Image: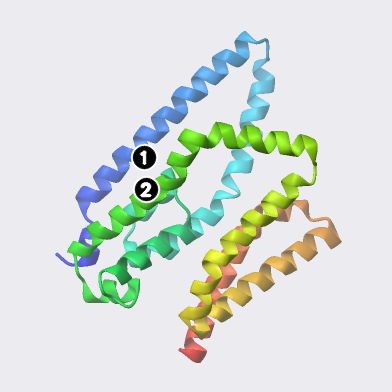
Amino acid sequence: MSYLDVANSSLLYVLVALGILYVLFLSVLFLVKAWKRAIALGITKEQLNGVVTSSLLFTIVPSLAVVVGLFSLVAALGLPWPWYRLSVVGSVVYELMAADMAASGLGFGSLGELVKAGDAASFGTIMYVMSFCALGGLLVLFFAGGKIRKGMIKLGEKNKEWGILATSCFFMALMTVFLPVMLQAGKVYLLTLGTSALVTVLQGVMIKKFNLKWLQNFVLANTLILAMASSVLWTNLFA
């Protein structure tokens, strides 16, 4: 079996489907418990239906970006595994970066080279790396999430600007992690990064200037689609 044969195997589809069904079961279970508790507190069914409807709308629209991200992962990781990762816990940027680092650790220049080589045994290594590395944030939240949240609330009460500063620092930290990778990857990566930044800024300007609040839910999806399309253009021109 080749690399993509393993990545798209029937067994993996079955295992992934079972995992996602388990998550859906838990979601429904907590929904039922929350619904019963709300009724017990005196909240009407009409109010609950309104909450459910609005929640569905505000969940489906942003998930378009996740769907776009799924298709970007399929070529290198098959369909079932990215489907599982993005359905449970994961992000497009992290999944690609973790898989690419795993490929580098296995001696390949990139994830693309690994796929071309067709090394089926490497797919299991990639799955482990993508899974275990993601546990870091979950473990920190499990053991220290409550203390971190309480500390941030106290700081926010003392200084209201703390929340803005913390968010800014968080995004700066993300940029310092991902930007060097993009800058060193080559001209196509750099141009695609610049295109995505430009598209994001233009959408922000449109939202503010024309009061297009509905566009806020589509910024990430639009940016992903247009940046991916531009990467094809840059590849044809410069690769």
Q: Which amino acid does label 2 sit on?
A: Tyr
Judge whether 236 appears above or below 228 on screen.
below
Question: Which quarter of the image is occupied by the N terminus?
Answer: bottom left
> What residue sits 39% from the left and 50% below the top?
85
Q: What x and y, as percent, mark residue 118?
A: 21, 71
Q: Which amino acid does label 1 sit on?
A: Ile
> What residue sits 47% from the left and 41% below the top?
140
Give the mark nearer the N terminus: 2 vs 1. 1
To which quarter of the image does residue 208 belong? bottom right
Q: Which residue lies furthest to the left in this view?
A: 1
Within 10 Å of disc 1 (Cα), the crowding (few <14, some 14-19, many 20+) is some
In the picture of the structure, the residue carrying the numbered disc 1 is 20
In the picture of the structure, the residue carrying the numbered disc 2 is 84
Q: What x and y, as percent, mark residue 214?
A: 73, 51
To which quarter of the image does residue 53 belong? top right
> What residue sits 24% from the left and 50% below the top?
12
